[in-house]
Image: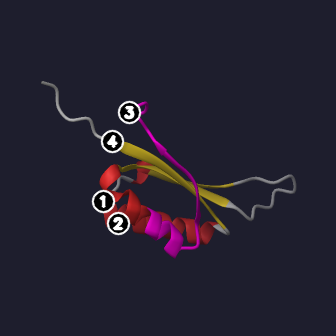
Amino acid sequence: MRGAVLVKRVLAASFPDEVLARAARARLIDDFSLDANQIGVEALAHERNVSDVTILAGRFEEDVVAAARDVVAEFGGTLVIDIDDQGRNA
């Protein structure tokens, strides 16, 4: 019998600014002992090179998803993606 399949979810959230998104990223890394490469932050470019939206995205084990959502909300983020990864990026 093969080992249990590790279920992960992909979460992405928008933030009103990069400072809040980076603070949320730091908290998520600390709280869930994530490798810094498992979660990223990028500002969205606008036509005038001014960004007022920053996206945070990462893959999380199923058992920490609810707590990760709470961290996003605590830092003013809005969840925009919450999908089952289905092992496509394992």
The tag earlier along the polypeptide, 2 or 3, is 2
In three-dimensional space, the C-alpha distance between marks 4 and 1, rounded to whole angstroms, equals 17 Å
Residue 20 picture location, percent across and down: 58, 71
Q: Which residue is mark 3?
A: 87
Q: Secondary structure at mark 4?
A: loop
Q: Which residue is mark 1?
A: 33
The tag earlier along the polypeptide, 2 or 4, is 4
Q: Which mark is residue 30?
A: 2
Q: Residue at x 65, y 60 (%)?
A: 54
In three-dimensional space, the C-alpha distance between marks 4 and 3, rounded to whole angstroms, equals 7 Å
Q: Is residue 1 above or below residue 7?
A: above
Give the amino acid at mark 1.
Answer: Ser
Which one is in front, 57 or 6? 6
Mark 1 neighbour class, 10 Å CA radius: few under 14, some 14 to 19, many 20 or more: few
Q: Secondary structure at mark 3?
A: loop
In three-dimensional space, the C-alpha distance between marks 2 and 4, rounded to whole angstroms, equals 21 Å
Q: Is residue 68 above or below residue 8?
A: below
Q: Which mark is residue 7?
A: 4
Furthest toward the right, the residue is 48
Q: Secondary structure at mark 2?
A: helix
Q: Quadrant of the N terminus?
A: top left
The tag earlier along the polypeptide, 4 or 1, is 4
* Magenta-colored span: 69-90
Residue 57 picture location, percent across and down: 52, 52
Asked if residue 55 lies in the magenta stretch, the reply is no
Q: Quadrant of residue 7?
A: top left
